[in-house]
Image: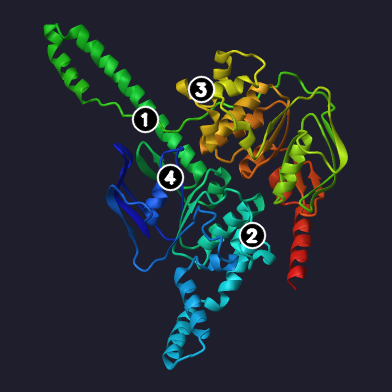
Amino acid sequence: MISANNVTYRVGKKALFEDVNIKFTEGNCYGLIGANGAGKSTFLKILSGALETTNGDIAITPGQRLSVLEQDHFKYDGYPVMDVVIMGNERLYQIMKEKDAIYAKEDFSDEDGIRASELEAEFAEMDGWDAESNAAMLLNGLGIETDLHYQMMSDLNGNEKVKVLLAKALFGNPDILLLDEPTNHLDLDAIAWLEEFLINFENTVIVVSHDRYFLNKVCTHTADIDYGKIQLYAGNYDFWYESSQLIIKQRKEANKKKEEQIKELQEFISRFSANASKSKQATSRKRALEKIELDDIKPSSRKYPYIDFRPEREIGNEVLTVEGISKTINGEKVLDNISFIVGHDDKIAFVGGNELAKTTLFKILMGELEPDEGHYKWGVTTSQAYFPKDNTAEFDNNYTIVEWLTGYSAIKDATYVRGFLGRMLFAGDDGVKKVKVLSGGEKVRCLLSKMMISGANCLIFDEPTNHLDMEAITALNEGMIKFKGVELFSCHDHQVVQTTANRIMEILPDGSLIDKITTYDEYLESDEMARKRTVYTSTATDEED
């Protein structure tokens, strides 16, 4: 068990949260939620001991091991992948290294033999002989191929490093597991594996995530940071949302009744306070009026943007034809003879672990890359707006936000442009911020403003939920559902894919394509998905053998 006792944390004079008392018990998974800036990551750091409280303390059951998902992706570049995962159990890793050092000695003494014997006993007690196989299972489950397990961390790409650090956090059955955005940079298959792992995990988990489907799947409880407090709810994210909305509604209704009662009492007092025969009743009502207190309903720190993609032109029947497109990147064939036709009602989700293939296809369709073979053709009634995964080039300039967005607007009017920025929560002086200094989330909101102002009838999104908070993801999800045009998108948010897409395309590791008119959940349960998994699992097993 881990608990916070009267915890207050201040940044300068501002209290991020104050007098927090909360217990996290064994066998439960707690989703820690709140608006950006509410203090979710800060609270996890306080629980882990990485930050000191201003007041109060953190208590952990003696003897329990706490594990944290680390965020520094370069910290372990000098170590092999397998070593990094096993470092998740620090004591076990120390034993392994000390054993190796003793056995490497040329002048092996009696004392060394005694010490080695002690270490071997502790090593066996900690299930050390299965450490590498257990680590390998975690890595394989998260999509790290076996041939990478003994490579150096410096040889891995960014997404692979994230997965190794997650495997490190999960390794060795920790008693308390703290996970800050564990689904970031994971593909949908890896997220599904992590969901099953956490569902079956029997100890304490505290997780921060902006993925609503993930929180609904794994969480038994929800801890909501708002109003400078942390309120605990028994249930997942949807249960919290319904409960919190119901509480607010009940308070408002109670206040409304009290306001009506106050009005009646005030009217009576006003009419009869000067009337001798009614003076006692008026005095009695004055006392009753003084006792009525309205509930203090504080404004939530959550702010929802308004995302509404409105096409200026209705799309025709001919939208997009792709014929025989192939592309090799750095010696790897990521697209192999890809062909499909897009209809005017299609909302297509590109899923699966082949991230480079999806991004490459989108860049080809937007004219940023040339295919090695094949061709594509957009219909004459179509207009496209594109959300790139890497937006660095978009903001490498000295424009203010208003100037930047005006450059993409057909109407060169600052008030008009500011209206679109306002929808994305850029208010007042935000408009004169330089785009090159914006945070990751602000840049994403700028790009969504750009897509709204474009009036395009074909939208292409490459991982648009990265860097967004829960409220913005919810607003984007609603905007994508309501859009009266064609969408091609990749997204790691299960709920966005399930509620938006009516057609699923998966580019497999060999560059080929599965294309199904179905929802995402139906696709996951389909025979094609089962066969695909069988084929690639068998291939991986053959390679290992």
Q: Which mark is residue 251?
A: 1
Q: Which residue is mark 3?
A: 431
Disc nearest the viewer among 4 and 3: 3
Q: Which mark is residue 40?
A: 4
Q: Secondary structure at mark 2?
A: helix
Distance between the Cα atoms at labels 4 and 3?
28 Å
Asked which quadrant contains residue 462, the reply is: top right
- 174 is higher (above) or lower (below) than 327: below
Q: Earlier in the sequence, mark 2 or mark 4?
A: 4
Image quarter where the C terminus lies is bottom right
Q: Which residue is mark 2?
A: 155
Q: Earlier in the sequence, mark 3 or mark 2?
A: 2
- 38 is higher (above) or lower (below) than 218: above
Disc nearest the viewer among 1 and 4: 4
Q: Is residue 233 visible?
A: no
Q: Residue furthest bottom?
A: 110
Disc nearest the viewer among 2 and 1: 2
Q: What crowding class fits label 3: few (fewer than 14 Cα within 10 Å), some (14-19), or many (20 or more)?
A: many
Amino acid tagged 3: Gly
From the viewer's side, name the closer residue of 268 and 336. Answer: 336
Residues tagged 2 and 1 counted as in contact (Cβ below 8 A):
no
Q: Earlier in the sequence, mark 1 or mark 3?
A: 1
Distance between the Cα atoms at labels 1 and 4?
26 Å
Distance between the Cα atoms at labels 1 and 3?
36 Å
Amino acid tagged 4: Lys
